[in-house]
Image: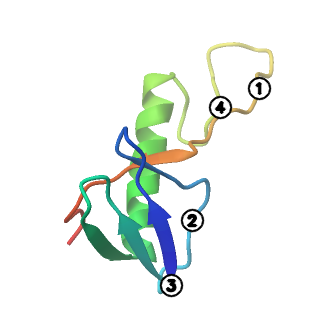
Amino acid sequence: MITLQQDADGFIRMNRHYPNSVRIRIAFTDGSTGEFSGQTLNNAYDAALAEFRAKNGLDARGFSRTSASRQNSGNKVDFVPVHPGMGE
């Protein structure tokens, strides 16, 4: 089991997908804890990544199609918003 801590802004640090079958416990800032599957957190990660790319004008693969020059590939997220009872 993996244990993660929610920060004061409501995020957990997650910069990759976890295996779908792993159980992950999150300690929330309000003192409660929740246990989630890897699939649930992977879905939250994918949603955060899609929102980040949409806000920054990137396509589904994370590239800017507006300019001809190659840009820095800082097109990933490191923090994912979480809340008690999500995805269940």
Three-letter residue code for mark 1: Asn
- Give the secondary structure at mark 2: loop
Q: CA distance from mark 2 to mark 1?
A: 22 Å
User: Where's residue 24, x and y in %?
Assistant: 44, 76
Above or below: residue 87 compared with residue 8: below
**Residue 17 - label:** 2
Viewer-nearest of discs 4 and 2: 2
User: Where's residue 49, x and y in %?
Assistant: 49, 44
Where is mark 4, residue-wise?
63
- Give the secondary structure at mark 1: loop
- Give the secondary structure at mark 3: loop
Q: Nearer the viewer, residue 74 or 11?
A: 11
Callout 1: 10 Å neighbours few (<14), some, many (20+)? few
Q: Identify the residue at image location x=76%, y=22%.
A: 71
Q: CA distance from mark 2 to mark 3?
A: 15 Å
User: Where's residue 88, x and y in %?
Assistant: 20, 72
Q: Say which quarter of the image contains residue 28.
A: bottom left
Where is mark 1, residue-wise?
72
Three-letter residue code for mark 3: Met
Instruction: State which tag comes first along the sequence, 2 or 1.
Output: 2
Where is mark 3, residue-wise?
1
Viewer-nearest of discs 4 and 1: 1
Q: Identify the residue at image location x=23%, y=62%.
A: 86
